[in-house]
Image: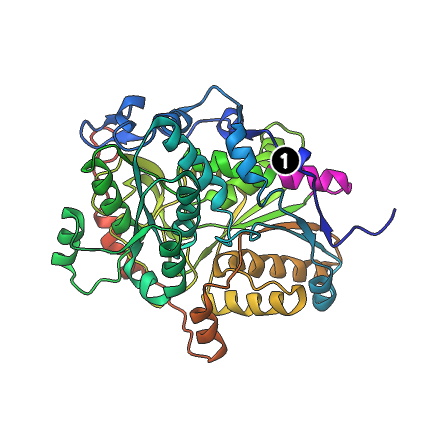
């Protein structure tokens, strides 16, 4: 057999025409969302004031395994998809490992990340419904960047509530969001009741995704014909991101490969869920048994140290409650945390799969070790990875080194979710040896856990 190429490209005709709804093959569904007003399972119509109707339907869909991708979205996808599946030959050689390391590279667009896959879908459905403005939150800035691109394409005004500490640490992300025409508001802000309430309690807070979500949703429900969109966590987002895994599987089949280990960084769960989707289908249906690893920052360890309970998805406690691994919606990551993945909870789908043992392993890593891996990867593979992606790189390297010790030649696939070109302040800190690690103590986590909601008959 001839040598596998460095990069495996699909043709435009091989871009999947349908998203895969992983929920259809799960042995058990995740617990339903709960309406905070009634403390009863949320109904489809409960979501309409916040989400576009088609997106709300996708969020609740447990009957459709494959959902057609509209032609308008496919045409947009062709601007940067299909994305390449790459073999990390140089990294393998540097590590001296018998393992074969592949990565799915999602950084070949201006947002520099996988987030555009869902951003264009959500903007399209908003435009189709006649929505006249959108609002969202963003942490490290990838989602805000991607959605600003999509909204510019469909000519929809956008307001982005950006976590305050991120807007200060990542001015170039903020600048590119504004370049595409979106309005950026550091969160928490004085522009909403939720923001003012948070600032009153903690005027010096650097903010969190939970804070920004509260402000964005309040903005949506208080402005006429405006809707809220979210870049991770929700089932609809994992649905759109399934295109990552679907393309990966097609590309691996073309070269006669199948991964033994699949690794993704995990903040809210969108890229991880998208990458693993068709391979998880194989596991759930008994066709194969790949080993799945979720990698999260040790300073925001929802899977490895969180509780699997119902919690609000936002700090202002206006969203539906979701059953997920969570640190509590009041949890705010340390300001020294530079690597994204800052959300207090984890996707209900990912949480359920992890709780039931189908997602095999969750690992929390220190950011200095993450950037060490990022620098090594950049040196040998010539791509400067996003800090988020570098969590997956860290564990991919660790798994490859285990193969070196045992002599096993395992096939490793990880998600390179994007590039780090807008995250240079973090790289500067790493190179100057001024980057520090923060590991929350049990005492640090107590306030978030103590504030978890009480739900009569469910969680008391």
Q: Residue furthest right?
A: 1
Residue receiving disc 1: 15
Instruction: Where is residue 340? Give x, y as percent.
Output: 41, 58
Image quadrant where residue 403 sits: bottom right
CA neighbours of label 1 inside 10 A, class few (<14), some (14 to 19), many (20+)? some
Count of numbered circles on the image:
1
Image quadrant where residue 79 sits: top right
- Please state the extent of the stretch shown in magenta in the rendering: 246-258
Task: Look at 55% across and 61% down and name the residue there.
Answer: 385
Instruction: Where is residue 391? Give x, y as percent.
Output: 51, 58
Query: Would you say 8 lies left or right of 274 here?
Result: right
In which quadrant is the C terminus drawn?
top left
Give the colour scheme of this rendering. Answer: rainbow
Task: Look at 22% across and 49% down and name the residue there.
Answer: 450
Instruction: Where is residue 238? Give x, y as percent.
Output: 47, 37
Task: Look at 17% across and 48% down and name the residue there.
Answer: 194
């Amino acid at each position: 057999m001839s040598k596998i190429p460095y990069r495996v490209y699909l043709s435009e005709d091989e871009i999947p025409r349908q998203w895969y709804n992983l929920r259809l093959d799960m042995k058990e569904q995740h617990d339903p969302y709960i309406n905070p007003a009634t403390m009863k399972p949320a109904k489809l119509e409960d979501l309409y004031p916040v989400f576009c109707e088609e997106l709300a339907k996708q969020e609740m869909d447990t009957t459709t395994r494959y959902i057609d991708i509209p032609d308008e979205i496919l045409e947009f996808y062709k601007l940067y998809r299909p994305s390449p599946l790459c073999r990390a030959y140089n990294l393998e050689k540097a590590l001296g490992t018998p393992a074969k390391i592949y990565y799915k590279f999602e950084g070949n667009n201006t947002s520099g990340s996988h987030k555009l896959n869902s951003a264009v879908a959500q903007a399209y459905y908003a435009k189709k419904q006649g929505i006249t403005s959108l609002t969202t939150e963003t942490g490290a800035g990838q989602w805000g960047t991607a959605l600003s691109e999509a909204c510019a394409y469909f000519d929809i005004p956008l307001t982005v509530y950006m976590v305050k500490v991120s807007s200060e640490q990542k001015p170039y992300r903020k600048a590119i969001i504004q370049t595409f025409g979106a309005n950026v508001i550091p969160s928490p802000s004085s522009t909403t009741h939720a923001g003012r309430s948070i600032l009153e309690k903690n005027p010096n807070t650097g903010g969190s995704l939970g804070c920004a979500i509260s402000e964005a949703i309040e903005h949506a429900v208080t402005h006429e014909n405006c809707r809220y969109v979210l870049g991770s966590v929700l089932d609809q987002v994992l649905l759109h991101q399934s295109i990552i895994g679907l393309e990966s599987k097609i590309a691996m089949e073309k070269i006669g490969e199948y991964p033994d280990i699949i690794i993704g960084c995990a903040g809210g769960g969108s890229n991880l869920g998208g990458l693993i989707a068709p391979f998880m289908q194989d596991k759930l249906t008994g066709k194969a048994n790949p080993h799945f690893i979720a990698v999260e920052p040790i300073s925001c360890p929802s899977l490895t140290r969180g509780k699997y309970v119902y919690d609000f998805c936002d700090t202002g406690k206006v969203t539906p409650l979701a059953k997920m691994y969570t640190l509590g919606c009041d949890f705010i990551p340390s300001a020294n945390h530079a690597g994204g993945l800052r959300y207090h909870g984890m996707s209900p789908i990912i949480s359920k799969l992890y709780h039931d043992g189908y997602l095999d392993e969750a690992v929390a890593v220190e950011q200095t070790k993450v950037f060490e891996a990022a620098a090594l990867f950049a040196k040998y593979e010539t791509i400067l990875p996003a800090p988020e992606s570098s969590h997956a790189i860290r564990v991919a390297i660790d798994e490859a080194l285990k193969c070196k010790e045992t002599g096993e030649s395992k096939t490793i696939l990880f998600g390179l979710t994007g590039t780090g070109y807008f995250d240079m302040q973090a790289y500067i800190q790493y190179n100057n040896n001024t980057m520090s690690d923060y590991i929350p103590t049990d005492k640090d986590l107590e306030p978030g856990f103590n504030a978890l909601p009480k739900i009569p008959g469910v969680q008391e």
